[in-house]
Image: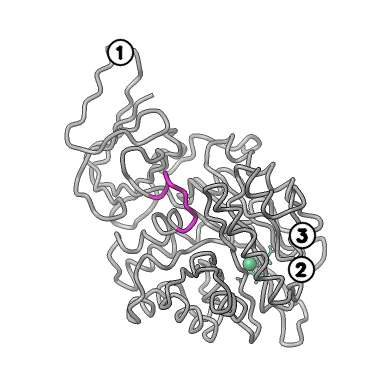
Amino acid sequence: MITIIRNAKVYQPEYAGIKDVMLIGSQIGALGENLKADLGGAVEVKEIDGTGLLLIPGIIDSHEHILGGGGEGGFHTRTPEATLTGLTLNGVTTVVGCIGTDGVARNMEALLAKAHALEEEGVTTYVYTGSYRVPVHTITGDVMRDIMLLDKVIGVGEVAISDHRSSQPTFEEFARIAADIRVGGMLSGKAGIVNVHMGDGPRMMDFIWRTVRETEIPFSQFLPTHVGRNAALFESALEFAKAGGTIDFTGSLDDDDEVPVSKGILRLLDAGVSSDHFTISSDGQGSLPIFNEKGEFQGLGVGNASCLLKELRECVNKAGLPLELALKPLTSNPARILKLARKGRILPGCDGDICLLREKDLSLHTVIAKGQVMVAEGTAVVRGTFEK
Ligand code: FWO
Ligand code: ZN
């Protein structure tokens, strides 16, 4: 199958002008003007009119509870799993699944099966092995074996620190996890990322700082998430980013975080942090529990991948960031830090993961994943197995 998207304003994410983009099978084949594909009728050539539309790389969500999560208020508060259109209708074409608080009734075997299910339904999936808990609950019994032997495992997480729900790991346990996943990643050509769940506790990023300062493990091994959840944590995360680390904001639908994403990004840029060093993920299907100061459960919401395009719009419309910069934390930045070589960019040889947005309101028009049209003019044309 060949698909030519014509005359769209192409963001690679850097702006490339009005171009045609040709998809050959599941990959981007070419960018250019007046592209033609004449295969003597042997292969169907689809055309999509991209006139007046913005063509961007498919969104990479580096932290989503695709299996469902939650449970902090008892069994009835376990959150529902991700659905295919819950991803594609929000522009997500690549997702990294993780397990959170409940590492017992949610396990790695089920997470991996869910990741394969979503891959079979049409998007690209990866997983972090483990959950909040230390020692890490793996599939093979060992963090290094998991990342070396299981293709979809690209790191460990979300490892909880500075949180009343963590395992209260020692620094040595934390450093050992980072060491093992680093070497396992190295030996398997993967990022070996430690996706660190940052809680509200006063120790904040101490374990990460100590690992970077007291061991040979580099900044790039860590991707701390939820960094906007309180102002003090954000200041520490800002220092980490200034020192060369990458930090991950959790998008939110009601800006209940103390540091809204677009404000946090402006702060980073003002502080001289490169626009390569921050990402935005959704925590989709994860629980958003509220606890009072005594640690008593008050209630919970559920994360949703729709926060990603909402944060993109806020970065452009509220913070006045150029689209080509605001796209980086959702596309080329996670692709780089997670070492997803063919993801996050509109370049020949990259996977055919593309979103078309309407220019006036950055609303979603079309989504293509691995060369397959998943959403056309705002309607899902491919649905999950049990989605009606
Ligand atoms: C955050 C996932 C939190 C689950 O602190 O970590 O609970 O297991 O599903 N969510 N615990 C939400 C804040 C960033 C608002 C998780 C959740
Ligand atoms: Zn978390």
Which residue is found at the position 24% from the left and 36% from the top?
6
Q: Is residue 41 above or below residue 251?
A: above
Q: Ligand 1 within 8 A of label 3's CB?
A: no
Q: Residue furthest front?
A: 216
Secondary structure beneath disc 3? Answer: loop
Residue 350 visible, this orientation? yes
- The answer to if 255 sits in the magenta stretch is no
In the image, 240 versus 266, the foreground residue is 240
Q: Is residue 220 above or below residue 198?
A: above
Give the alpha-carbon distance from disc 1 to disc 2, as whole Å.
57 Å
Give the alpha-carbon distance from disc 3 to disc 2, as whole Å.
12 Å
What residue sits right under mark 2 in the picture?
A: 72
Q: With 114 as the anchor, is 55 left or right in this view?
A: left
Residue 252 visible, this orientation? no
In the image, 282 versus 276, the foreground residue is 276
Quarter the N terminus occupies: top left
Which residue is found at the position 47% from the left and 49% from the top?
340
